Amino acid sequence: MKSASAPTPAATSQTRHDPPSMHTRSEPPLWALRLGYAGLAPFVIGALTVWLVSHDLTPFAMLGLAAYAAVIASFLGGIYWGLAMRDGQTSPLFPFVWGVVPSLVAAVAVIMPPWAGLVVLGFLLMACYLVDRKQYRLFHMNGWLTLRFRLTIVASLCCFLGASGV
């Protein structure tokens, strides 16, 4: 005879794919907010630098901004591998495929002329946010979307401003 407290197969499966920690902590902690906003400093400084340095140094400033944007885009893709691995996911394939797309696009953007690559990176950061809007709900991370939106707006705007500094 089964005890009333024994988990059913459906409950066990649900627990395996949706750990309780995902349900109990949807909002980013204060330290994550601070680190996220601090991560905007290189975007803002990079965009300002593009506009403030002499014309001869502008391509280097743009390249620095593009390199940082590429690193951040790669980080945003890598989150999906971490989430899928944490959940022990082997299917669906989407988190693993999407996880590498931002890195591949960013790598191409960095080798483009900086003014063009920064435009690609600005749109890539926006695309990452749009994917996150849909996918974060599946991982019970809706509370992070406000932070992601704010960071995306500033980072993308800095990329576009940097691109226009030619």
Image (tube, grey):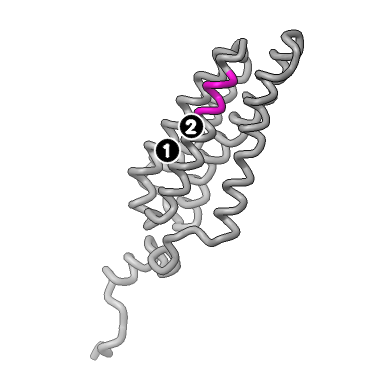
Quarter location, residue 166: top right
x, y (%) of residue 100? 51, 34
Q: Residue at x 40, y 42 (%)?
A: 132
x, y (%) of residue 23? 38, 66
Total count of labels: 2
Q: Give the residues in magenta.
A: 157-162
Amino acid tagged 1:
Tyr
Disc 2 packing (10 Å; few <14; some 14–19; many ≥20): many
The image's mark for residue 36 is none
Labelled pair 2, 1 in contact (Cβ < 8 Å):
yes
Quarter location, residue 123: top left
Q: Is residue 85 located in the magenta-colored stretch of the structure?
A: no
Task: Determine whether, in the image, residue 114 is placed left or right of residue 28.
Answer: right
The image's mark for residue 125 is 2
Quarter location, residue 65: top right
Above or below for 95 versus 103:
below
Q: Which residue is mark 1?
A: 129
Q: Residue at x 53, y 61 (%)?
A: 29
Secondary element type, mark 2:
helix
Magenta segment main secondary structure: helix
x, y (%) of residue 110? 62, 20
